[in-house]
Image (cartoon, rainbow, N blue to C red):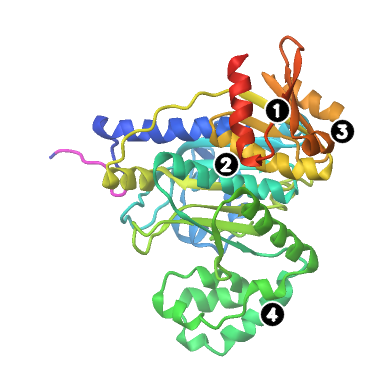
Amino acid sequence: MSIKALKGFKDILPDEVGLWQFIEKTARDIFQRYGFEEIKVPILEKTELFVRTIGESTDIVEKEMYTFVDRNGASITMRPEGTAPVIRSYIENGLYVRGSVQRLYTVGPMFRHERPQKGRLRQFHQMSVEVLGSNSTRIDTEVMAMAWHILQEIGLPASLEINSLGCPECRPSFKEAMQGFLQKRSKHLCEDCQRRSSTNPLRVLDCKSEHCQAQYVSAPSILDHLCSACSQHFREVRQNLSLLGVPFAVNAKMVRGLDYYTRTTFELITTELGAQGAIGAGGRYDGLVRQLGGPEVPGIGFAMGMERLVMLLSQKQNERLETLPLLDLFLVTLGEAASEKGFILLQMLRSQGLRVMMDHEGRSMKNQLKQADKQNARFTLILGDNELANCEVLLKDMHSGEQQLVELTPVFEDWAAVIMTKIRQQ
């Protein structure tokens, strides 16, 4: 009798690999444009890592993890998701001393013992992205814009849905309201939702039962219970997405299946997969690093499932996109008005194919130039409020030290094209 692959484990055959390579190459190109670095973490971790981060009452920990006791008597788990291992590595290797903000991504297999279905396997592959060290709402926006950007470039447009899950300050009032709501409907809920209604009522909204979802149509909204800081944070995120022209919709019922999320949460949705419509999802997890014994460092990230992307591309029979050229540019801004315009220009230049970064922490010009030098930027573009008023920017060649004043048109939408032309002439 021939030996076959395990249920839920799939061979990736040579005629499929081309699509995998195309998606990975496109994503890696975009990750580089946004200033991300790759990190590789082990497949096996101590079980405690996932119990502490994902949450004991989650389906992943209770039902889905591949956990076993090794020969030394230690409980070991095959990673079910990418964030916890990256955070563990970030703390263990002291990556926070390299710089105040770390942009990391990893690509590789994950493992969950769940029912195999369309686009979902027991061994599956994810691109997992993490930004550690910034509270800026612009970072939230950049992360979501980058996820949206990847799908646009591989030819899979999707809709972006966002929500805020609040913080430890405002969740208790929502928890109380939810528990009161659920108590009145307890007999109509599934066994899992009945159990969660007293321990983690927010997670009942993630139940896959259509019967339970019908009960939650009139459930309280977390957005009505946000504290002033979380409300301001969510308002700025929405404003920033509008600035960058990234379309989105607010979904107040959206939650994540992992316990560590706070504030911004989001999903990228396609209708091509029926009920399993999410092809990318993520959010903030500001307390996770401290929870694992590290410093008080905020974080945000997302993951995309490779199998679903490959399946959708196969269905659409997309032609492969050519690799875009990568150039290095650091955008230095001085003044609030210049910073806002620079934030939009950043996205415009990335859409033109440049690898571009800027400072979001309000640092001085000297420190911004140090950042550009540290990252070995080929050029810096200096934009202050005076330059903004005069429709000009200062372009500096970081190799030769030469700089030139680039005159721009009053039409802001034309700036990226003019700057691209000047850079190509160098």
Q: In terms of image quadrants, where is residue 412? A: top right
Identified at 55% across, 71% down, the residue is 253
What's the CA distance linking mark 1 and mark 4?
47 Å
Q: Position of residue 262 (x, y in %)?
A: 67, 59
Quarter of the image holding residue 345?
A: top right
Image point (28%, 43%), residue name:
314
Question: Which sits earlier in the primary sequence, circle 3 or circle 1?
Answer: 1
Give whichever of discs 3 and 2 has the lower sequence position: 2
Image side of residue 153 versus residue 263, left or right: left
Identify the residue under disc 1: 330
Q: Nearer the viewer, residue 281 or 211?
A: 281
Residue at 78 percent of width and 40 percent of height: 338
Q: Which mark is residue 176?
A: 4
Q: Nearer the viewer, mark 3 or mark 2?
A: 3
Label 4 crowding class (10 Å Cα cut-off): few <14, some 14-19, many 20+?
A: few
**Residue toward you, 345 or 276:** 345
Q: Which residue is mark 3?
A: 364
Marks 3 and 4 close (CB-CB < 8 Å): no
Location of mark 2 (residue): 129
